[in-house]
Image (cartoon, rainbow, N blue to C red):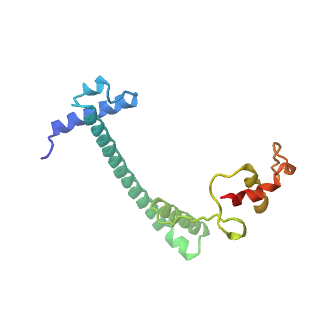
Amino acid sequence: MPVSKVQAAVTAERRANLIKLRRAGVRFEDPRILELGYASRGAATKDFVRALEERRDEQAAEASVYRQEATERIEALIEAHWEAATSGEDPKSAELVLKLMDRQAKLNGLDMPVQTELSGPGGGALQVGPVGIAQLRNLIRTAGDPDPDDTDEEAPEDAIDEDAEDDSDDS
């Protein structure tokens, strides 16, 4: 059954007041929340979740509208510079069009995510889990220090435990 405009307004006001109270740190058990017209703590909790979901849906719709408007602006700019960019007459137009196309791809999520992979010494599997400081130093020594200018004043190089190499075989 459709909700009347009056009932929708009452619900919206009650939810707004509920959100204000929750933002102020008021717990669902507090009488002030029940005074808003909720029959129980559970009813208030359920309505709070509904209010958040409704707001999330509104935000998603707004973001979608923004994305569409931005895409249309970018397409208009690309169209305006396309001829100069593709004729070879204006290298700056070509550069601009490429930047606009890159921005458009990012805006619409067209680029594939960058895939990265970590591997251990010799390209083998990299052990992930709790490790000791000696094992970390051994790994850095094996891989090479990414910042050789950075000196570790707390632990000089001669303080490395050479027996740490055997610790990794305990698992």
81 or 104, nearer to the observer: 104
- Please name the residue shown 16% across and 39% down the image: 5
Q: How many marks?
A: 0
- In the rendered view, does 145 fall on the left or right side of 32? right
The residue sitting at the front extreme is 170
Residue 139 visible: no
The residue sitting at the left extreme is 1
- Please name the residue shown 56% across and 67% down the image: 93
Residue 41 visible: yes
The picture quadrant where one finds residue 75 is bottom left
23 or 124, nearer to the observer: 124
Residue 65 position in % (x across, y down):
36, 54
The residue sitting at the bottom extreme is 87
The picture quadrant where one finds residue 86 is bottom right
37 or 65, nearer to the observer: 37
- In the rendered view, does 24 fall on the left or right side of 124? left
- Please name the residue shown 32% across and 30% down the image: 28
- In the rendered view, does 84 fall on the left or right side of 73? right
Residue 151 position in % (x across, y down):
83, 48
- In the rendered view, does 75 fall on the left or right side of 14? right
Q: Quadrant of the C terminus?
A: bottom right
Residue 163 position in % (x across, y down):
80, 55
80 or 137, nearer to the observer: 137
The picture quadrant where one finds residue 88 is bottom right
- Please name the residue shown 22% across and 36% down the image: 11
Picture layout, residue 9 above or below residue 117 = above
